Image: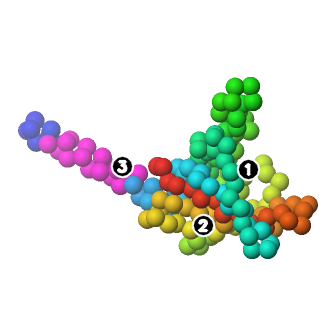
């Protein structure tokens, strides 16, 4: 009888373990945006059809965007600390937001406590879902530049790291 009870408890434990793994995996696979993304490059697009790639300073390799299954977004973008030249994670390095899927390639993203409107951005998943390109139209986002030669949009490229 003890062996039967023990076998039953082991069976129940394995069932619970396999169920919890399925829940974790289904949450991760629920949407391709969910995960931790590393900033690779930003390309600015201009009205005359030209573009320019942003030159990153050395701390940009630590920039991360974390999209969670519950619709929240954390962004980390350290600055260079002027006195030492080291990467500085201060209050301005972090921002929180929300995201929502609109359709296959469109998501809205909102930085909390931001002056810009909710922006709908076009997301392209490449390299089996491990590379993400985001197209942001500045006018649609409510970003207005006071120059005739200012960019009209940007492509942000990120790689999945988790």
At 56% across and 68% down in the image, what residue appears?
124
Q: Residues within 10 Å of mark 3 (few under 14, many from 20)?
A: few
Q: Are marks 2 and 3 in contact (CB under 8 Å)?
A: no
Q: Residues within 10 Å of mark 1 (few under 14, many from 20)?
A: few
Q: Left or right? Give the position of 121 relative to 15.
A: right
Q: Left or right? Give the position of 18 relative to 154.
A: left
- Provide the secondary structure element on which disc 1 rests: loop
Q: Nearer the viewer, residue 65 or 108?
A: 65
Q: Using the numbered discs, state the Cα–Cα distance from disc 1 to disc 3 in whole angstroms.
A: 32 Å
Disc number for residue 59: none
Q: Nearer the viewer, residue 5 or 82?
A: 82
- Provide the secondary structure element on which disc 2 rests: strand
- Where residue 110 appears, as percent x and y from the top left, is 71, 56
Q: Using the numbered discs, state the Cα–Cα distance from disc 1 to disc 2 in whole angstroms.
A: 20 Å
- Which is more N-terminal, label 3 or label 2? 3
* Residue holding disc 1: 112
* Residue holding disc 2: 123
Q: Residues within 10 Å of mark 2 (few under 14, many from 20)?
A: many
- Where residue 98 appears, as percent x and y from the top left, is 66, 54
Let me know if residue 18 is in the magenta part: yes
- Provide the secondary structure element on which disc 3 rests: helix
Q: Left or right? Give the position of 157 relative to 7.
A: right
Q: Which residues are magenta?
A: 7-24
* Residue holding disc 3: 20
At 14% across and 42% down in the image, what residue appears?
7
* Quadrant of the snapshot with the N terminus: top left
Q: Using the numbered discs, state the Cα–Cα distance from disc 2 to disc 3 in whole angstroms.
A: 30 Å
- Which is more N-terminal, label 2 or label 1? 1
Magenta stretch, main secondary structure, is helix
């Amino acid at each position: 009888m003890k062996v039967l009870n023990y076998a039953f408890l082991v069976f129940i434990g394995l069932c619970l373990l396999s169920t919890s793994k399925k829940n974790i995996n289904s949450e991760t696979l629920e949407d391709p945006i969910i995960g931790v993304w590393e900033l690779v490059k930003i390309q600015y697009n201009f009205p005359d059809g030209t573009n320019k790639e942003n030159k990153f300073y050395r701390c940009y390799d630590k920039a991360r965007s974390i999209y969670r299954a519950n619709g929240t977004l954390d962004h980390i973008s350290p600055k260079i600390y002027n006195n030492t030249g080291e990467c500085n994670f201060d209050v301005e390095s972090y921002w929180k937001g929300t995201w929502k899927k609109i359709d296959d390639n469109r998501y809205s993203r909102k930085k909390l406590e931001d002056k810009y409107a909710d922006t709908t951005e076009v997301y392209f998943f490449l390299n089996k879902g491990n590379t993400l390109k985001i197209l942001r139209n500045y006018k649609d986002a409510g970003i207005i530049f006071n120059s005739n030669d200012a960019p009209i949009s940007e492509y942000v490229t990120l790689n999945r790291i988790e």
